[in-house]
Amino acid sequence: MRISEKDVLYVAGLANLDLQAGETTQLAADLDAILGYVAKLDQLDTSGVEPMSQVLYDAPETLAWRDDRERGGFPQEKSLGNAPERGAGHFKVAKVIER
Amino acid sequence: MSLDVSRWTIADVREALGSRRATAREICEATLARIAEENPKNNSFLTLTEDRALEQAAAVDRQAAEGMPLPPLAGAPIAVKDVIHAEGVRTTCASKILGNFIAPYSATAVERLETAGAVVVGKTSCDEFAMGSSNENSAFGPVRNPHDLERVPGGSSGGSAAAVAAGMCVAALGSDTGGSIRQPASFCGVVGVLPTYGRVSRYGLVAYASSLDHIGPLGRTVKDTAAVLSVIAGRDPLDSTSAAVAVPDYTADLDQPVTGFKVGVPREYFAEGLAPDVRAQIESGLTTLRGLGCELVDITLPNTEYATACYYIIATAEASSNLARYDGVRYGRRSPDAASLSEMYRKTRDLGFGTEVKRRIMLGTYVLSAGYYDAYYRKAQKVRALVARDFARAFDTVDAIATPTTPTPAFRLGEKAADPLAMYLSDIYTITGNLAGIPGISVPCGTVQGQPGEGSSEGKRLPVGLQLLTRHFDEARMFRLAHQFELAHQKD
């Protein structure tokens, strides 16, 4: 096994997922099978190959940045339109400071 | 008798409007009636936009009455995959987590469609957040294949493909990250197009894997998909990855001959795993291409067998990042029983995401986590470069590449649902196009006999798709070859 249930819980924490008990076991098995499959990439010698981080051409990651000019956004009402909870022109959430 | 528009093309719509045989309103009403009849069978649509459609149709009729020239898609009923925003309409991504999210703006592709006179009739189902190959990962129930209701329509754009196949719209928009337009098009016997990366703006497309996501059209003819792409393609300042490359009229040269085109046939796509009856159909398709005067060339794309592994690292890594935004703060459903903010994030995400989405977020988070980034993500990016290089080398000698779109015809509902890896491998021939960023099209290429299922006396005929791939931004040649193939293969 490449992946234990402990690993799954650790990754779930990073991904902000609160898994149910059955899900942890199933995910450990699924991820183990998938990682076993993708391990075939290790058969390939990729020394000297540059990682492909642009799709159409070799270019730095900053190539497509737009000019740093102000551009209109959505008005407040529209931005808040889908909020599960709102108040005083803001998104409302539960207590942020936990300790 | 009421109007039957279920097999109409964009040209038929134009002709009807031009000759005053039908109004855009009548075409729209006939389409909505067809949807009302078919949707209970195949579950293609998640949301209908009747009022918006009738308004848009009325605008087209006003233009026609005033004798104004009609825009290219005037009155054509079009469906939109429910990961693409239409302002004022709910976007669900076929997920529970978005709740009753109402899109505050329209995707550039939708805006361009409507400016061109198209009538958006509704939002189609898909796998949750476009993650899947069967449309079974929808929080609103699976879509069924119109050719055999016991089978999947493919995915993730299964609703769009089924809607086109069942005559519920003339064309549809889908999105394709690893085959999500071409694979369902193949399963449903329609045409599906993956445009070059950056060809169509993704502003307003809900992001899954940003370096692999494309918006593209599905239709009943190659010409219709070419007409839709001509409208939606082009640079958009709102999407920095959209390419500043001129957009030709893709319908202009469709009737030109394809004699002398060199078409590569990669041996890796005809190896183990390709169903013998699908292979026979594709080989008959290759014979048709030869009959058109194309020269078939045996080529090799040696890194093909690594593509699926490469894809599932890159796509899930990008997905884990893109889907971090669904936290219950700004939109969507929020878990009501959480005492703190971080508990609210975790409970909301556990409640809202389906199994496959969680699996991909987990895999993506794992491959990006400390200590594993180089071994997985960076390695996969290097392998991606090798896959792209395979295609670049092939295109030094050939103009196009022909392959099966999928190794099998549409499979049964539930057949692969318990085995994620088997499901991932159904995209084996389409994933490479996304990794390389090149354009591809799936065109119907005959049918095969499906096996009868439990309780049914006979199996149905199931469509097969031929995939044609070309160089970056060479969609014009791809459409021309596909159109000529479509005409010739119908005769064969």
Image: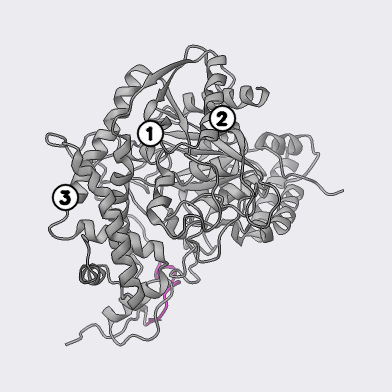
- Residue at image point 46% right, 65% down: B95
The answer as to whether the residues below labels 1 and 2 share one chain is yes
Q: Which residue is mark 1?
A: B438
Q: Is residue A15 left or right of residue B30?
A: left
| Whether residue B95 is situated above or below residue B280 in the rendered picture | below
As measured in the structure, the alpha-carbon distance from the residue carrying label 3 to the one carrying label 2 is 40 Å
From the image, state whether disc 3 or disc 1 is nearer to you.
3
Task: Looking at the picture, tell me which residue is in the foreground, A67 or B256.
Answer: B256
For disc 1, the chain is B
The residue tagged with tag 2: helix, strand or loop?
helix
Where residue A13 appears, as percent x and y from the top left, is 23, 72
Identify the mark nearer the N-term, 1 or 2.
Answer: 2
| Residue type, mark 1 in image | Ile
State which quarter of the image contains the C terminus of chain B. top right
Task: Looking at the picture, tell me which residue is in the foreground, B63 or A55.
Answer: A55
Local crowd size for mark 2, using a 10 Å CA cut-off: few (<14), some (14–19), many (≥20): many
| Residue type, mark 3 in image | Ala
| Whether residue B165 is situated above or below residue A84 in the rendered picture | above
Residue B341 visible within the image: yes
Q: Which residue is mark 2?
A: B281
Q: Which residue is mark 3?
A: B375
Q: Residue furthest right?
A: B1
Mark 3 in CB contact with mark 1 (< 8 angstroms) = no
Magenta residues? A75-87
From the image, state whether disc 3 or disc 2 is nearer to you.
2
Q: Is residue B297 left or right of residue B277?
A: left
